[in-house]
Every structure is written in structure tokens, then in C-alpha cells.
Image (cartoon, rainbow, N blue to C red):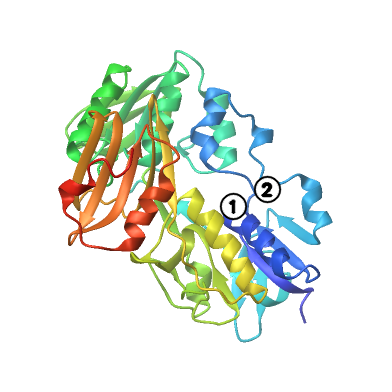
């Protein structure tokens, strides 16, 4: 016997989950909705954790996606601080860690991801920050006072953003990462090396092409030894080396998984009454093929679309998500498949500062990054959607 019976259950309490609520209510004003989240905080925007909260352009109360009254007004029950541990698709039942069970008609898995851990001695030391949640931000911000030192492990999106935030807050910052330049999976070499040089000019010590092999506590400090034989002492240690999608619930329930929870064009899993959205979903992106994407716009649109389809819209997902970042004075918006292993064409107005980087595969535009150019995403998306073979040089001036 179940404790609760609900029309729609959403597992997860991030942007995809909150957006799914909106999608459901666009098609079904009356069906009961239960949103279950492991975090104690209600759904919030994640990008400000490494951006605007540090610059002071936003406060914590600004990042919550909805006023608390919104959920009650729209018939949504919130169960926060609650971990779902089992799913029985045949019975349409979930169970949480307290033993409570919940029956659903339609279910959304918006379980997100968990930070990847350092597989080195000391990788689980107390106080070491695997930066992901608003609670991580609160703890890090409370200790990140001017004049302290920080080691940031990781040179991708999170590592580069949090390093810039800490340096701008007056900390001495060192970065260590295995690539030869920052965000090497996305930035082509010329841009990546220019950005890395900019970080150094801002006072960030860069240890590229290196990885930690052991971490120890020495009084109030961490001491990190690297593969290259270097040793770094720091007051704070922040790790941003990516996330692993939270697929265990789906996998243990017999749903099809791989690099995420696999869904079809309607965002249904291998069970027709269970959907997936956000960082955990591996979906057939329009034009570009199957992908799993860990960005804000993707969570927003996948979540909303999944909610609509749960409530009967039955619409294929056709959106190509974009993403964005701000690294000191360098900001960008990008769309599509921005893999630095593709052929790239840089159309600069000012080299490595303002312009467009095109990502090309088999003669077709697969992605575009607009550097310090904003409001051009739709133009870039149109180039990708046409999927036509192009003369690479003809792309110059296509986006201005």
C-alpha cells in the first residue's frame, strides 16, 4: 500500500524539475503534482553560484526560481530533503529513504548529476569543496575571505568560473588541470591559450598539464602534491572536474541507460510513463544527434517540454540548446556541438576577444561560439539547423 497517490511525480528539484511543473500546468491545470528533491533548498538557478553571487549582482534570495507561494498556488507539493531510493515501473511506485512510497501516473526523472570525485589519497578530506550546490556556495563563501589562498582543481567550465570568482574576491588562486589550456574541450588552441594568458595576467597561477596525486591536511591548510612533483599549500581547495549523471535509480529499475537516462524524441524513457530531463537525460537532439548536455538552457527547455508531454502534448523535442559563461572580462554564448576536436574557423573582430568561432564537421556548421557578442544565438542556431555543406571562408561575416 502506498502512502501517496499523485498524477505527476517529479524526482529532482532543479531547473529541469521546476520547468516541468510549468509544462504540466500548460496542459493540465488540475492534476496533482509532487516534486521530490534531495536538497533542502527549493528549486534555484545554478549558474549564479559561480557567477553573479560572487560579483554581488545577485543575492541568494534572487536565485530561487519561484516564490514559495507559487507551488501551493499551482497545486504542487514539495518534499525537500528527501532521497528517492527505489522505483518500480510496473507498479508505478517510488520509495524514499524513510520507507514512504508514492504512486504516480506519470513520472519525470530530473535527478541531475553528482560531482566527480578525486581518486587520490586525501580526495575525501573534510572541508574540501566539490562545488555544485547552493550549500556548497554558502560554505565556500563563508571561508573565502580576501587574502586567503585557494587551489582550484579542474580547468573546465566550473573550475575556470570559480577561479575567476575567487580571484576577483581578492584571494590568491592557483589552478591545476590536465589540459594545456583552459576549457580545452571547447576552446580551440589559439583562444584557449589567450584566455589562459589572461588568467595569468589577472594573477592566477596556472599549472597546466598536471594533476594532483595526493592531498594532506597541515594544520589549517591543505598540501597538494602533483604528478609533476610540485607541492601547493592552500587555505581552500575547490574541485570542479565535471559531474556524473545520476542514473542509478533508473538503471536499478531496468530502464535503458548509458551516458545518462536514454529518452526518445518525446523525452520518454524505455518505459512510456517515465520521462527524463536535464543533466541526466541522453536525448536525440535535433540535427546534431544523441547527446547529454549539462547547461541551463537545456535543463529549462527539456524540463518544460517533458512536463508538457507528460500532460498529453505529445510533441517531439526540436530545440538546440545554447550555453554561456563569463570569465573575467571574457563572456560568450555558444550553441550546438562546440567540440574543439572539430575543424574550427575564427572570425575575429578583435583577435581572441570579440568575434565568432565556428565548429565544422563534414563541411557543415555544427556549433558556434559568440565571444563578447550577445543576442546572436538564433542566427547561429539557424546555420546549424540548415545542416548544409558550406564553404568555410563564406562563414566570415555570417554573424556580426
Give the secondary structure at mark 2: loop
Q: Give the quadrant of residue 374.
A: top left
What percent of the width, then of the height, locates residue 125? 44, 38
Q: Is residue 170 left or right of residue 314?
A: left
What percent of the width, then of the height, locates residue 91? 66, 85
Which residue is the site of mark 2? 40
Q: Is residue 392 left or right of residue 337?
A: left
Residue, far top: 147
Q: Which residue appears at 67% of the width and 42% of the height?
A: 64
Residue nearer the viewer, 138 or 339: 339
Give the secondary structure at mark 1: helix
Q: Which residue appears at 66% of the width and 81% of the height?
A: 92
Q: Is residue 248 visible?
A: yes
Mark 2 or 1, closer to the camera: 1
Q: Is residue 121 visible?
A: no
| First of labels 2, 1 by sequence position | 1
Q: Is residue 110 left or right of residue 375?
A: right
Label 1 crowd (10 A; few <14 / some 14-19 / many >=20): many
Q: Which residue appears at 44% of the width and 19% of the height?
A: 168
- Quarter of the picture holding the N terminus: bottom right
Q: Give the quadrant of residue 177.
A: top left
Residue, far bottom: 90
Give the answer, above or below, for where 134 lies relative to 142: below
- Residue 172 numbered tag: none
What percent of the width, then of the height, locates residue 122? 37, 40
Report how far apart the C-alphas of labels 2 and 1 lie in the structure: 15 Å
Which residue is the site of mark 1? 15
Amino acid at each position: 500500500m502506498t502512502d501517496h497517490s499523485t498524477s505527476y511525480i517529479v524526482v529532482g528539484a532543479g531547473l529541469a524539475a521546476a520547468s516541468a511543473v510549468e509544462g504540466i500546468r500548460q496542459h493540465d491545470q488540475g492534476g496533482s503534482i509532487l516534486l521530490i528533491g534531495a536538497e533542502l533548498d527549493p528549486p534555484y538557478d545554478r549558474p549564479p553560484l559561480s557567477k553573479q553571487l560572487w560579483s554581488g549582482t545577485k543575492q541568494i534570495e534572487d536565485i530561487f526560481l519561484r516564490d514559495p507561494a507559487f507551488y501551493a498556488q499551482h497545486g504542487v507539493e514539495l518534499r525537500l530533503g528527501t532521497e528517492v531510493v527505489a522505483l518500480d515501473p510496473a507498479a508505478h511506485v517510488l520509495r524514499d529513504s524513510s520507507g514512504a512510497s508514492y504512486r504516480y501516473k506519470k513520472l519525470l526523472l530530473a535527478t541531475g548529476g553528482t560531482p566527480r570525485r578525486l581518486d587520490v589519497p586525501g580526495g575525501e578530506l573534510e572541508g574540501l569543496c566539490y562545488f555544485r550546490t547552493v550549500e556548497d556556495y554558502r560554505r565556500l563563501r563563508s571561508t573565502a575571505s580576501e587574502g586567503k589562498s585557494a587551489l582550484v582543481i579542474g580547468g573546465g567550465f566550473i573550475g575556470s568560473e570559480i577561479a575567476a570568482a575567487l580571484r576577483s574576491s581578492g584571494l590568491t588562486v592557483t589552478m591545476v588541470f590536465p589540459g594545456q589550456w583552459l576549457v580545452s574541450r571547447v576552446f580551440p588552441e589559439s583562444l584557449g591559450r589567450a584566455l589562459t594568458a589572461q588568467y595569468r595576467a589577472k594573477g592566477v597561477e596556472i599549472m597546466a598539464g598536471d594533476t594532483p596525486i595526493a592531498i594532506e591536511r597541515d594544520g589549517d591548510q591543505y598540501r597538494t602534491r602533483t604528478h609533476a612533483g610540485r607541492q601547493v599549500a592552500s587555505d581552500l581547495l575547490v574541485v570542479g572536474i565535471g559531474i556524473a549523471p545520476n542514473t542509478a535509480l533508473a538503471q536499478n529499475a531496468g530502464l535503458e541507460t548509458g551516458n545518462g537516462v536514454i529518452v526518445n524524441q518525446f523525452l520518454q524513457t524505455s518505459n512510456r510513463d517515465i520521462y527524463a530531463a536535464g543533466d541526466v537525460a541522453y536525448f536525440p537532439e535535433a540535427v546534431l544527434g544523441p547527446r547529454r548536455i549539462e547547461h541551463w538552457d537545456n535543463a529549462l527547455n527539456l524540463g518544460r517540454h517533458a512536463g508538457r508531454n507528460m500532460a498529453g502534448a505529445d510533441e517531439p523535442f526540436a530545440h538546440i540548446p545554447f550555453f554561456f559563461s563569463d570569465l573575467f572580462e571574457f563572456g560568450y554564448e555558444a550553441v550546438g556541438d562546440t567540440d574543439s576536436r572539430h575543424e574550427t574557423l575564427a572570425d575575429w573582430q578583435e583577435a581572441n576577444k570579440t568575434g565568432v568561432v565556428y565548429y565544422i564537421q563534414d563541411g557543415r556548421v555544427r556549433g558556434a561560439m559568440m565571444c563578447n557578442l550577445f543576442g546572436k544565438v538564433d542566427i547561429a542556431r539557424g546555420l546549424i539547423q540548415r545542416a548544409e555543406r558550406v564553404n568555410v571562408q563564406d562563414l566570415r561575416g555570417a554573424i556580426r
